């Protein structure tokens, strides 16, 4: 199982240390992502993939292997000295434009991620894109009561967006 972790916020180093310990204890994989340059992250505060690699290096990298995902994106699979496993992209997605829908996005110049796949937030909302303002679909209640029909309907509705 993989857990996405965005490096940013008021206490990014402390939060990273907590997440590394969490995934090490549970034998999970941490997908470490830079904070997107919109919302609370100003352009001057951007953290690059190389910056994230340096942060991990300071915490003790044991091994690094390069893997290629189904979309052809190269990633470092890093095993830390504490046993945590971390996936860190080698390429900025926005430079690769991996998703066709990204080519019509009005905010493509701000998005270095090129993120179009559907995400489920911790609050139970489906987000069809992290950047271009497509509305979230609140599934919290449907998930809580395990209403599979409503969940399927919500996912199908994204095709119409």
Image (cartoon, rainbow, N blue to C red):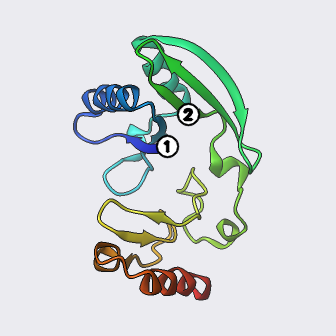
Residue at point 47%, 83% (across, down):
154
In-front residue for pair 35/17: 17
* Residue at the far left in the pictured view: 10
Task: Please tell me the numbered disc located at residue 2.
Answer: 1
Judged by depth in the image, the label closer to the viewer, 2 or 1, is 1
Residue at point 32%, 59% (across, down):
122
Residue 160 sits in which quadrant? bottom right
Count how many numbered circles sit on residues in the image: 2
Residue 124, percent from left and from top: 33, 68
Please report contact status of discs 2 and 1: CB closer than 8 Å, yes or no. Answer: yes
Q: Is residue 141 above or below residue 91?
A: below
* Residue at the far right in the pictured view: 72
Disc 2, SS: strand
* CA neighbours of label 1 inside 10 A, class few (<14), some (14 to 19), many (20+): few
Task: Please tell me the numbered disc located at residue 79.
Answer: none
Q: Which residue is mark 2?
A: 87
In-front residue for pair 43/99: 99
Residue 19, percent from left and from top: 33, 33
Residue at point 52%, 79% (across, down):
155
Q: Is residue 146 above or below residue 110?
A: below
Residue 145 sits in which quadrant? bottom left
Residue 110, percent from left and from top: 53, 56
* CA neighbours of label 2 inside 10 A, class few (<14), some (14 to 19), many (20+): many
Relative placement, left or right, of 159 versus 84 is right
Residue 38 sits in which quadrant? bottom left
Residue 111, percent from left and from top: 54, 56
Disc 1, SS: strand
* Quarter placement of the C terminus: bottom right
Q: CA distance from mark 2 to mark 1?
A: 9 Å
**Nearer-N-terminus badge (2/1):** 1
Residue at point 44%, 50% (across, down):
37
């Amino acid at each position: 199982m993989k857990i996405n972790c965005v490096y940013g916020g008021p206490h990014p180093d402390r939060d990273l240390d907590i997440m590394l310990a969490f995934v090490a204890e549970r034998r999970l994989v941490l997908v470490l992502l830079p904070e997107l340059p919109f919302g609370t992250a100003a352009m001057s505060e951007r953290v690059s993939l190389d910056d994230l690699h340096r942060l991990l290096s300071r915490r003790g990298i044991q091994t690094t292997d390069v893997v290629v995902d189904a979309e052809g994106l190269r990633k470092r699979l890093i095993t830390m000295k504490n046993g945590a496993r971390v996936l860190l992209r080698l390429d900025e997605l926005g430079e690769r434009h991996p998703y066709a829908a990204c080519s019509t996005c009005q905010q493509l110049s701000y998005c270095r991620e090129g993120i179009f796949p559907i995400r489920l937030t911790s609050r139970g909302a489906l987000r069809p894109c992290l950047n271009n303002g497509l509305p979230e679909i609140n599934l919290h209640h449907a998930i809580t009561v395990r209403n599979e029909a409503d969940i399927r309907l919500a996912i199908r509705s994204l095709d119409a967006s």
